[in-house]
Amino acid sequence: MPSMAALVEMHAIVKSFGNHRVLGGVDLSVDAGEVLALLGDNAAGKSTLMKVLSGAVVPDAGRVAIDGREVTAPTPRRMRELGVEMVYQDLSLCDTVDVAHNLFLGREVVGRFGLMDERAMHERAAALLGSLDIRVPSTRQRVDTLSGGQRQAIAVARAVTFQPRVLILDEPTSALGVAEVEQVLSLIRRVRDQGVAILFITHRLQDVFSVADRVAVLYEGRKVADWPTAGLTLERVVNAIVGKPA
Ligand SMILES: Nc1ncnc2c1ncn2[C@@H]1O[C@H](COP(=O)(O)OP(=O)(O)OP(=O)(O)O)[C@@H](O)[C@H]1O
Ligand SMILES: [Mg+2]
């Protein structure tokens, strides 16, 4: 029954690269307004699983459903149409252009004569950043002059311009300082509070306890844990990550 289904359901996802099986039949679901932390050691398959959800990686087997309906051809374009946005580990910002142009890259605001309407774009950029409580000195600043945390925030804001229902963040806090981490975590909370389902990959267990409602752990391409964060101990999470039986 579709009404009983979670917003996102991945079922029995299998993926090999050559003869290396990276995902060995993974189930994962997440609901609207929920933050799921996806954990696991290096090469456990986290990014690959999330790329399957974003349509960037085609699985060898398994199903992805949105609102209980199977997505038959999950290309990046189709997944974006269905409301899935992913912010990649490398952020894919365009360093040499300013904040506003990064937010609307490829979709620049067009004015009456088909020209880019600079003023409107900067106004929209400022409004968007304001709504997410993101602070940068100016929407005219080049992104290569921003701090790591500001760049991460711009990458998330760019994804938010697509009005996603599902937002995937691949290690959004790994390269950040303490204060910057807090800013990104509170940005995650604000987007979650707008009803978006958030899946975020992290190696920082302290982030998990501060924003995640639920934790899933991959170990060598298999899901070994899927637990609510409430009442969970750090020790249990660490044991799952290193593959110790619970
Ligand atoms: N396009 C690819 N071609 C070949 N092998 C790949 C490809 N993408 C990923 N892999 C391999 O799949 C395995 C899982 O990679 P993945 O990036 O999903 O791990 P991860 O859990 O995100 O790790 P990390 O925490 O280091 O980012 C790794 O052994 C990696 O080398
Ligand atoms: Mg990864």
Image: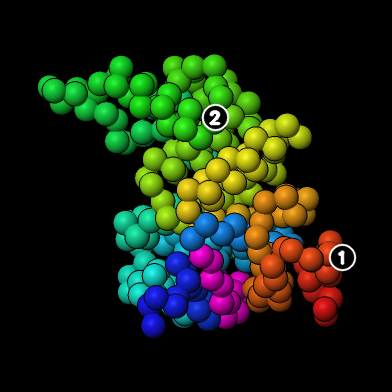
Q: Percent position (x, y) of residue 63?
A: 44, 77
| Residue beneath the point at 38% across and 77% down | 2
Query: Residue 135, relative to residue 45: is it above or below?
Result: above
Viewer-nearest residue: 191 or 139: 191
| Residue beneath the point at 55% across and 22% down | 136
User: Callout 2: few (<14), some (14-19), or many (20+) C-alpha neighbours within 10 Å?
Assistant: some
* Residue marked by disc 1: 235
Q: Percent position (x, y) of residue 119?
A: 30, 17
Q: Percent position (x, y) of residue 134?
A: 54, 29
Q: Quadrant of the N terminus?
A: bottom left
Viewer-nearest residue: 7 or 108: 7
| Residue beneath the point at 56% across and 72% down | 28
The reply, left or right, for residue 128 in relation to residue 18 is: left
What type is the residue that disc 2 sits on?
Ile
> Does the magenta run of residues contain 18?
yes
Q: Percent position (x, y) of residue 168?
A: 52, 54
Q: Which secondary structure class fits the magenta region best? A: strand
State the colouring used for the structure image.
Answer: rainbow
* Residue marked by disc 2: 134
> Would the CB of label 1 be found within 8 Å of ligand 1?
no
What is the spatial separation of the Cα atoms under label 2 and label 1, in whole angstroms? 34 Å
Hey, which quadrant is residue 162 in on the image? Answer: top left
User: What secondary structure is marked by label 2?
Assistant: loop
Q: Which residues are magenta?
A: 17-31
State the mark number for residue 6. none
> Does the magenta run of residues contain 219?
no
Q: Of marks 2 and 1, which one's residue comes earlier in the chain?
A: 2
User: Callout 1: few (<14), some (14-19), or many (20+) C-alpha neighbours within 10 Å?
Assistant: few
What type is the residue that disc 1 sits on?
Glu
For residue 218, say whether it is visible.
no
